[in-house]
Image (spheres, grey):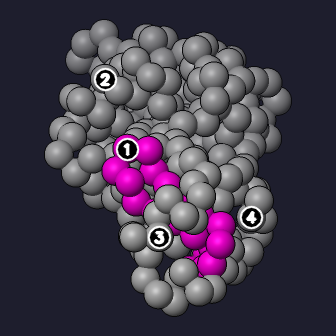
Amino acid sequence: MSGDDGCARLVFRGELVDLLRQGHVDGNIRYPLGRRASIKDVVESVGVPHTEIYGVLADNESVGFDHLLLPGKVVELLSADIAADNAAVPDAAWPVDVTRATLLRPEPLSELRFVVDENVARLAMLLRAMGFDAAYDRDWDDPYIARMAFEEGRFVLTADRALLKRSCIAWGRLVRSRDPDGQLAEVTTFLGIRRAPAMFRRCLRCNVETVSVEKAEILHLLEPKTILYHNVFRRCPQCGRVYWPGTHQQEFARRLAALDIRAE
């Protein structure tokens, strides 16, 4: 597959191959160049959001998304795990470390916080239950989510390719799994999350950190059996919802253990 006829050759590696929406041979695409185009524009035109790419090699040299594609050149696009194993991409890491600056993402996140799209909504509740800041509202549209991700430094989780193609989004994941537990496994593996930092210390409804509350202050809100068997409570300062240790927390801890994630 040559590129001396006004075409360049794109070679997609790893899980990027499954995202291609253009005909290819084992991830290889002969791409005609009718105009000047950056790597970002080209890869997204064949179906792969730039957020899924963690290494770009032109003539085996690591380059950025703004690199111009030229006729006759071969460009390799690498998924995160493949990039981390390639010596030509020294700044790549697996699992992905969002607090580490790279050529493709020169502005790292100060901490791991999420914004979750409606199409993977249940994932937001699972991340909140683990203690992560996972912003979500079913009424938020793509421009709002993109702006929040940029302004607040959040990692976007979505099943919407178009959302992740927005230039202001640097960090994100196109979630492939369909069921919530599978999505959680996918995200925690991708980001190297191996512990729940604050189990049930965040309101599942509001995403606000809960605070300890004396039992006497909330007796009027509790069922008789809850009053009888439980003495430790937390409450959301925003919506007033009350939380206490119970079988639901034990069951969630078992679900996390199945993913090799320890609860704290």
Q: Amino acid at mark 3?
A: Leu
- Residue 234 on image: x %, y %: 56, 58
Asked if residue 156 can be seen in this view, the reply is yes
The rendered magenta stretch, by its main secondary structure, is classed as loop
The residue mark sitting in front, 2 or 1, is: 1
**Where, by quadrant of the figure, is residue 79 drawn?**
top right
Nearest to N terminus: mark 4 or mark 3: 3
Measure the alpha-carbon separation of dots 4 and 2: 32 Å
> Horizontally, is 184 left or right of 48 in the view?
right
The residue mark sitting in front, 3 or 1, is: 3
Q: Which residue is mark 1?
A: 238
Viewer-nearest residue: 9 or 67 = 67
Cβ atoms at labels 4 and 1 below 8 Å apart: no
Q: In what element is the residue under mark 3?
A: helix
Q: Which residue is mark 3?
A: 219
Measure the alpha-carbon separation of dots 3 and 2: 42 Å
Q: In what element is the residue under mark 1?
A: loop
Is 31 above or below relative to 22? above
Measure the alpha-carbon separation of dots 4 and 3: 28 Å
Measure the alpha-carbon separation of dots 4 and 1: 25 Å
Q: Amino acid at mark 1?
A: Gln
> Horizontally, is 30 left or right of 258 in the view?
left
Is 264 above or below relative to 56? below
Viewer-nearest residue: 184 or 136 = 136
What residue is drawn where x is 54% and y is 37%? 113
Measure the alpha-carbon separation of dots 2 and 1: 24 Å
Q: Which residue is mark 4?
A: 263
- Residue 11 on image: x %, y %: 53, 39
Q: Which residue is mark 2?
A: 147
